Amino acid sequence: MSKNKNYRIDNLQYCNWSKEIFESNREAGLDAIHVTIAYHEDYDEVQENFEEWKEYFAIYPELIFQGRSYLDIEKAHNENKTAVFFGFQNCSPIEDDIKLVESVHQMGAVFMQLTYNNQSLLATGCYEENDSGVTRMGKEVIREMNRVGLIIDMSHSADKSTFDAINLSEKPIAITHANPLFWHKAKRNKPNDILKALGESGGMLGLSLYPHHLLDGTNCTLDSFCQMVAKTAEIIGTKNLGIGSDLCLKQPDSIVEWMRNGTWTKTKDYGEGTASNAAFPNQPEWFQDARGFNNIEKGLKKVGFNNEELHGILGDNWFNFYKDYIN
Amino acid sequence: MSKNKNYRIDNLQYCNWSKEIFESNREAGLDAIHVTIAYHEDYDEVQENFEEWKEYFAIYPELIFQGRSYLDIEKAHNENKTAVFFGFQNCSPIEDDIKLVESVHQMGAVFMQLTYNNQSLLATGCYEENDSGVTRMGKEVIREMNRVGLIIDMSHSADKSTFDAINLSEKPIAITHANPLFWHKAKRNKPNDILKALGESGGMLGLSLYPHHLLDGTNCTLDSFCQMVAKTAEIIGTKNLGIGSDLCLKQPDSIVEWMRNGTWTKTKDYGEGTASNAAFPNQPEWFQDARGFNNIEKGLKKVGFNNEELHGILGDNWFNFYKDYIN
């Protein structure tokens, strides 16, 4: 019998939050979600996003509460709620000030990406032409993140920077939402050598359900996805895999435009999209929202995972990672 | 006869400003100085530095006034004053927002470095281990700087980034304060291929009198310096050379510590110094302050420059560069 309680965790969501979405997460049995609260926000701006979540917690106490420790996942499980852990997809909230690492952690940030697509002060993003790796400030910030217990996320980073972060960090790092490159060639997906190094270092990969990361996009089949999971497990290790769906439910297209362009360009960048296909893509029919976890459970069984393995992928592996990191 | 009036320009000073220093600049015959008003300051912080200068202009109207156009150099010359042009040694004042390029230019910034030693959002600094060149945002910002007329300064940048900036910019760029690497091996000094590319593109090199950039440091001889100028002129072109002394008169050592460390590290970085030699270095006896221009004039004559050439180096070349750029 597994030592865990078959937790379900979605380790990346960025929805246009509402009661309906929190309810669908509960119907999916999600004990925890990691939600993005910063793409381009600076320190002052991200405070407003923390405040916004305080209001959600006040309005929907029967559905959600803020997660700070792995114990909150157990609590959520026992109380039929979803623990909400905060993360940043960019290092913009710490601006150019290493002291803000501790501040944002104290405010509740659990994950922070060193880069979001572009070069940051810390590392190189996956959309840059050249990757100089983790910078001088990046090395200092990694040490500080390790010290305070803020988890390094390299989902949107370029490859050398990701290897550097794995090697420089004293603690395992995460790629909270991406898929393997062997399955679908996207700038955001990761090559086998990174997956291998990530797994060997005790890190975690959250598999993405965002159509631009899926083979055949919106038309990706559940079977193709689960076959990919099986192959990926052979590379990274079954215990190093989880879900980070990258669900962006009900967001207006203005949001994806802002995510891609922030304030860094006066022209328009389409990121993973194109000028003729600039909007948020539609989710595959088997993962319209988090209730798709039930489909993935069936799909993983079908491709040969045993119960412990599939519950690991659906949440217990993230639970164990949190348990080692934030306790 | 030269078409210019033998202007004298020091294209980089960062002193602890006082009447005494403004007077010594006047005694040196300086018609214009380019002063640094940002190393790590963000947009709000740099406003305070602009305000501080408004006060200097109000207190010492007989000595200084703000320069905005090359015509202000002519005006200063005619009125026996020094026109003060503002610059940033980092892109921190524009934060992560390309719209701030126009704002800082409107506020009076004339030069902006894309980097200061470390990686920035725009390019790589000369103290980084790897140089990925001008970034995605850097390309956009260069275009915007060209559009508004803010001059690109690559004094503290790494080599590939500097080549990229020369190639990407539609207008000539400047290295306002550095020396050639062939003369003195310092991270801040520039290799011949950069000097060549800079000269061919119509750019300017401001020769530095900061001891860490000088052969034998504080003990550098005037003759050694002037011999270096003669050799450098053969590489970059005599018309592409000026002075950017990097004078940091009367600054307390806490300032150089802040320049090096900003808020990016919790440990201590010594930059061009060392733990045992962390302070501001002493100036060579022949360039204690800007009045050393008189010594350089004699020295340049001695190594064979004719009058037009040496007045070019002492100011007319910067004047012509300004004339083409800000009119």
Image (cartoon, coloured by chain):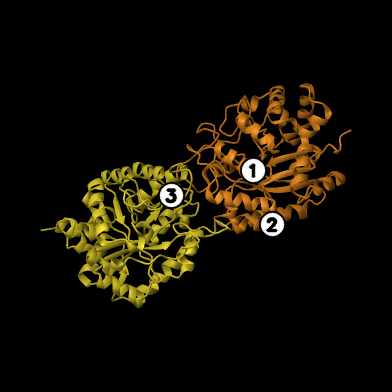
Chain colours: A yellow, B orange
Tell me how far mark 2 sits from mark 3, CA to CA: 35 Å
The chain identifier of the residue carrying mark 2 reads B
Q: Quadrant of the N terminus of chain B?
A: top right
Q: Is residue A233 above or below residue B270?
A: below
Is B233 placed left or right of A294 in the picture?
Answer: right
User: How far from the left and from the top, in percent, is residue A191?
Assistant: 34, 46
Residue at the (17%, 59%) spot, across then down: A302
Q: Which residue is mark 3?
A: A126
Q: Is residue B324 among the parts visible in the rendering?
A: yes
Label 2 or label 1, whichever lies nearer to me, is 1
- Residue type pointed to by label 1: Asp
Q: Secondary structure at mark 1?
A: strand
Q: Could you say which is closer to the camera, residue A235 or residue A202? A: A235
The chain identifier of the residue carrying mark 3 reads A
Q: Residues within 10 Å of mark 3 (few under 14, many from 20)?
A: many
- Residue type pointed to by label 2: Met
Mark 2 and mark 3 residues within 8 Å of each other at the beta carbon: no
Q: Residues within 10 Å of mark 2 (few under 14, many from 20)?
A: few
Q: Secondary structure at mark 2?
A: helix
- Residue type pointed to by label 3: Cys
Q: Is residue B231 above or below residue B248?
A: above
Q: Which residue is mark 2?
A: B107
Q: Which residue is mark 1?
A: B153
Are callouts 3 and 1 both on one chain? Answer: no
Q: Secondary structure at mark 3?
A: loop
Tell me how far mark 3 sits from mark 1, CA to CA: 27 Å
Is A310 placed left or right of B2 in the picture?
Answer: left
Are callouts 2 and 3 both on one chain? Answer: no
Tell me how far mark 2 sits from mark 1, CA to CA: 18 Å
User: How far from the left and from the top, in percent, is residue B146?
Assistant: 67, 50
The furthest residue to the left: A1
Label 3 or label 1, whichever lies nearer to me, is 3
